[in-house]
Image (cartoon, helix red, strand yellow):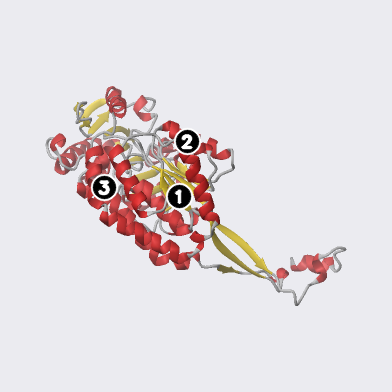
Amino acid sequence: MENTPREEIRRIVERQREFFRSGRTLDLEFRRENLRALERALHKWEGRLADALWQDLHKSYEEAYLTELSIVLGEVKNHIAHLGRWAAPRRVCTPLKMFPSRSKVIQEPLGCSLIIAPWNYPVQLLLNPLVGAISAGCTAVLKPSPYVPRVSRVMEEMIRETFAPEYVAVVQGNREVNTALLEERYDIIFFTGSPSLGRRVMRAASEHLTPVVLELGGKSPCIVDRDADIPMAARRIAWGKSLNAGQTCIAPDYLLVHAEVKERLIEALRKEFEHLLGKNPQEAKHFVRIVSDKAFDRLTGYLKDGNVRIGGTYDRQERYIHPTVLDGVREDSPIMQEEIFGPLFPLLTFNTTDEAIAFVNRREKPLALYYFGEDRGNIGKVLRHTSSGGACINDTIMHIANENLPFGGVGHSGMSSYHDKESFLVFSHQRAVVTTPTWLDLPFRYMPYRFFGMVKRVL
């Protein structure tokens, strides 16, 4: 895939700034029509997008639709239905000391946006933020990942057919293109990717004091307590780790298991992986491959960090790795230092819920936290005494499926949230407006502050 030339990038950004200044995007019907255009495009290009996802990632049509296309379509429909209410001026209470003024908040678009997406969910994570940008009235420069070249090319063709480039445009290429993109000035940058790249984005944005949304990742713990429903926990954990071959920012990253149920959980996971993917997952239609040789080599290098209890086999030619559980993993081992982003599951044990909480809190705040157990006291304790972008109790992944919930990280796992109204708000500025009539002008605020004693009591 050819890099978009630096001069073309500069030209795109300049044209989008001019288009935004024209005021066209301020009209709500203009925004609705472009949301409808995106919805029509997704239906029209569904087959080609699904084929490209299969070629780049070995992602089945069913998984492509459930985890990519359906999520974007749901977001589009939601924004079309609620845009008028979200964009309406909001009256707020005005205190007596400001009589006879009135106060309101108006939503205004930030302007020209840059959206940089990763490769693991290349359709959803590029287009879902775009829905928010269109809904809020922004223009958008889109940067898909070069690691999924077929998907990125189809996305570019779809966007070019659907939108004028001065409104929404796609820029292609490697990290050199990212550098060129980040040299330009935007009104908001929306980045999804690794914490290391997130730091680069934030440094570049600081040059222009550009607001950023960072959707990162981290090591999302999966805690299985002694009173958990082990068969159910194993089924939902195995599914959460098998989805996209573990290449999901909210995949359960490592297992923290009560020592009393460790062996039961390992055997239950063995059965559930086989139930989901068959005896040979390499032949399974619904098991995704690792995205690159570099990622494959990194993942297989982790196999020496513990004792293989499930899986452990791989095929470099296909970039296939069997879902693997590693026992006897040390807290300071390489596999426990960075997000795994693959179908490997290090397993560590604990003896009390407090011990598990302390383990989680010794690490950076994760994007997700999963807890399996029935004791309400322990559930409340885990939620109160840990912090994560999102959480599921007795489940994995599913908090992202509810479009009414905000999605985002905290601390090392990101900043700001989106989905539903949050997507509209994150691309908007909430502008405070006070309107004061001229028929009355109370003298108390003016120098030399007469009747200050009475004014002080009112304040």
Q: Position of residue 14 (x, y in %)?
A: 52, 46
- Residue 298 is drawn in which quadrant? top left
User: Which label belongs to residue 349?
Assistant: none
Cβ atoms at labels 2 and 3 below 8 Å apart: no
Tag of residue 140: 1
Q: Taking the image as drawn, is residue 372 in sight?
A: no
One can see residue 444 in this view:
yes
As displayed, is residue 444 above or below residue 193?
A: below
Q: Secondary structure under badge 1?
A: strand
Q: Nearer the viewer, residue 62 or 405?
A: 62
Q: Is residue 132 above or below residue 52?
A: below
Q: Position of residue 363 (x, y in %)?
A: 44, 34
Q: Which residue: 26% across, 29% down?
A: 326
Name the front one of labels 2 and 3. Answer: 2
Residue bearing mark 3: 49
Q: Give the CA distance from mark 2 to mark 1.
A: 17 Å
Q: Amino acid at mark 3?
A: Leu
Q: Earlier in the sequence, mark 2 or mark 3?
A: 2
Left or right: where does residue 138 sit relative to residue 300?
A: right
User: Which badge, 2 or 1, is on the more N-terminal residue?
Assistant: 2
Q: Which residue is mark 2?
A: 6
Q: Amino acid at mark 2?
A: Arg
